[in-house]
Image: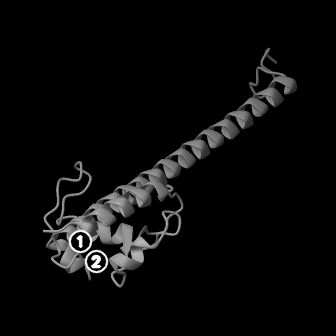
Amino acid sequence: MDAKGEHGASSSPKLQRWGRIVLMLGIVLVGMGATAAYIAYRTSKEMLAAEDRYQALMCACDLVVIAVEQSPEKKWPTGWEELERVSAPDFSGRFVWPRDAEKMKGLIEIDFRATVENVLKQTPQSFSAIRMREGSAQFPAAGINENFLGRLKRASERKE
């Protein structure tokens, strides 16, 4: 018999056991790395979706203020069709209006039954006339709401 033993194995049982342990640890580490990569991917995807909802909310607030300003009676818009007729500025490249109307409809909700008077009675914390659709990641909107309510108040008071 040669130095490798009967079956050609050159290592002792102790070394073989360590080899299996190292192999199992490697498999566990690769699995953990893959899991971490998947979690990072899902989190970034959710955060990008939340950012889209946040940007759509700001754009919708701009559209509603412009619609109220352009309305001779300073009225709240009655539907998406009315908003689609609003001439809007460039929304920093995130949305092009009215081309991206369908995308925005999927990201936000506007209460078209609201009135300017009722909306102006709301606080930034209770504001609900324009809101992001639900998602697992949300941004707080009280700051946007406060800004919107101030702009809406000024738009509704403007005389043509």
Residue 78 lies in quadrant: bottom left
User: Nearer the N terminus, badge 1 or badge 2?
Assistant: 1
Q: Nearer the viewer, residue 87 or 109?
A: 87
In the rendered view, tell whether residue 129 sits above or below residue 41.
below
Instruction: Identify the colour scheme used.
Output: one colour
Q: Where residue 59 is drawn, which disc sits there? A: none
Q: Amino acid at mark 1?
A: Val
Q: Nearer the viewer, residue 64 or 72?
A: 72
Q: Is residue 121 left or right of residue 94?
A: right
Q: Residue at x 36, y 60 (%)?
A: 150
Q: Quadrant of the C terminus?
A: bottom left
Q: Is residue 121 left or right of residue 36?
A: left
Residue 16 point in image, percent of width and height: 80, 28
Q: Residue at x 60, y 39 (%)?
A: 33
Residue 17 point in image, percent of width and height: 83, 30
Q: Quadrant of the N terminus?
A: top right
Circle 2 is placed at which residue position? 76
Residue 71 point in image, percent of width and height: 17, 75
Circle 1 is placed at which residue position? 68
Q: Residue at x 57, y 48 (%)?
A: 39
